[in-house]
Amino acid sequence: MEEFIGGLWHKFITRAATRSYPDAAVRLDDIERTAGILFRALGGDPGLRVAPAAEIEHGARRNWLQRIAHVGEKAAHAARDAETLRLPASIEFFPERSLNRDLYLWLIAQGAALPDGGLDADAWIAANQAASRATLAAFPGFAARYRRLVAAVIAERPDPAKLPADEAAAERAIRQALQEPGSVAGLPAARRPPMPVALWLYPAPVTIDRREQSNPPTPADRREDGSKAADATDRRRQAQREDMPDGKNGLILNFRAESLLSFAEFVKVNRGQDDDAEDDPARAAADMDRISVAQDGSDTASKVRFDLDLPSAAQDDTPLESGILLPEWDWKKQQLKRDVCSLTVLDPRDAQPCALPSHLLRPARRLRHQFEALTPARRWLKNQPDGPELDLDAVVRAFADRKTGHVTGDTGGYLSCERRERDLCCLVLADLSLSTDTWVSDEQRVIDVIRDSLWLFSEALGATGDPFGLYGFSSRKRDHIRFHRIKDFDEPADDRIRGRIGALKPGFYTRIGAAIRYATQLLAKRPEALRLLLILSDGKPNDVDHYEGRYGIEDTRMSLNAARQEGVRPFCVTIDKEGQGYLPHLFGPAGYTILRNPAELPARLPLLYAQLTGG
């Protein structure tokens, strides 16, 4: 009975003290696509990704009801750094859903107007006001929306008359800064920080390094295939680095039991079940405002992200050419590093010639029939000055004109036969990373869908006569980039090629920039006017080293820019549901397509090719 009554009381007091409106909530997932488009349209850095912000303790004054219910201690601050625009995962600040959505749009506009390097912790209030003035000046349509938001935000903020003098002065300064952006240089000093301002972006959480010296590498770092731990959640956390305590078995001595809840020092304690999995590690991480990180020279049993051992040479694919050096763009240094990547061209080992799988026979026949219409054919051109045959229509017309007294100039009276060729070629570059081993249905993995797509694509293009090549790639750090030759341009699409497609298997990681650069070199040697680079991918660029996030995306963008300069037209087909956030930055608004259902790829790929080549 006591637990039941306690549960009812908790629900009642929490509902009464919470200042939010769940029924009018707008989630970041609902406007993720709009957020990316609007951010780039307003002049924001197109390479930034939009991600949810973590809730952190703000320290502002709460009313007595909130203190009783233990709510209102944390808030999700919108923030921006050099790589990410962080927005609250959900906004339920206002009773009207339209206002909550408008708040998202305003925060996006603020993020686009702020400096590229993010906010300075000492001048972020002035920077927010400057961003507001710049946004309202450049985009007057935001003015009415901003006034509504300011009125709604002020209505939810504490009354300065009910605050201590120092906090009241800070609150009045905030209200003035919201109503007249640019009029406040800074906030007056106060004992407590003010309530978070929903219309402003905050400085991004920084990493505080308190170590006296760098720690020695762990055994995993010393190994060539060492692994690194991954974040338990995608939300950004404040972090600080600490030196590992010297004590082998730390204990807390001379303490009172009632003080345990307030103990916050870093203590290394050896547990008997160190390798046991946490029941809910993501939830535990979500409750942390600041995470302390230290190295103790030992490995943990739980690893999310890990390196992979390469197969032995006897079992690996056959190398055709190795040591091909390629550049890579260092986004942080804004520099193209020469000859830092090493690529190896491979041939599938033990790929036996085979026929087309039975489940693809019917769609292959249909595609061949459709694509035969694109085959170059002979056509007769009438009224030509010379040719192998007379143009009887032109001769009769000229004779009739003369009999009726019409004077005509010399016109052609011959038929000329012309064969118009399709002056184009295509290179298909398939992502063969480890992620292709995931299942997309009860019967197929991603790699199975890619195989089916390449089989049908080769059948369709074999009917047109267009030159095409099929290649795949994966990587393991910059010194081992694997480029799989499936079909060269001068090879016929026969059972031998079908066997190579059937021998494809998931590889390692996705260092796509180097693969695009080498594919561009192959296409640059082709004489055709239109050279199409068709990329099949299932996720973002990443590798086991630093090649991830903004670094990988910017290197991929620079490789695509170099391909365009060589006259290559890149196009991406992806099954990554998050692709809308970064693909426009890489390929442009019309340079990619996202398939929500991966099983559609085999049927869609040939049709996309026909659309891209004007067939």
Image (cartoon, rainbow, N blue to C red):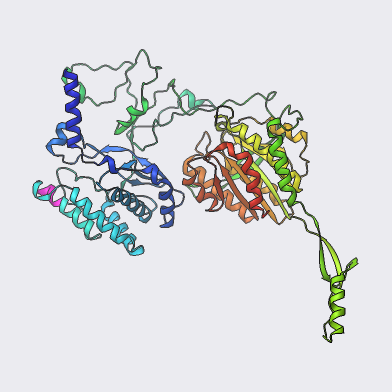
Say whether residue 568 is left or right of residue 283: right
Q: Which of 297 and 49 is in front in this view?
A: 49
Q: Nearer the viewer, residue 350 or 6?
A: 6
Residue 209 horizontal/vertical position (percent): 34, 36
Say whether residue 455 is left or right of residue 246: right
Tell me which segment is drawn in magenta.
164-170
Residue 425 horizontal/vertical position (percent): 71, 50
Magenta: main secondary structure: helix
Would you place residue 487 above or below residue 609 in this image?
Answer: above
Residue 324 horizontal/vertical position (percent): 67, 40
Asked if residue 166 lies in the magenta stretch, the reply is yes
Q: Residue at x 72, y 47 (%)?
A: 371
Residue 427 in which image quadrant = top right
Residue 494 in which image quadrant = top right
Quadrant containing the N terminus in the rendered view: top left
**Is residue 588 among the parts visible in the rendering?**
yes
Would you place residue 142 above or below residue 21 in this image?
Answer: below
**Is residue 323 among the parts visible in the rendering?**
no
Would you place residue 8 above or below residue 333 in this image?
Answer: above
Q: How many marks?
A: 0
Residue 320 horizontal/vertical position (percent): 73, 35
- In the current view of this chain or complex, which residue is farthest to the top? 272
Q: Nearer the viewer, residue 267 or 503?
A: 503
Asked if residue 216 lies in the magenta stretch, the reply is no
Q: Residue at x 16, y 22 (%)?
A: 5
Residue 482 in which image quadrant = top right
Q: Nearer the viewer, residue 12 or 210?
A: 12
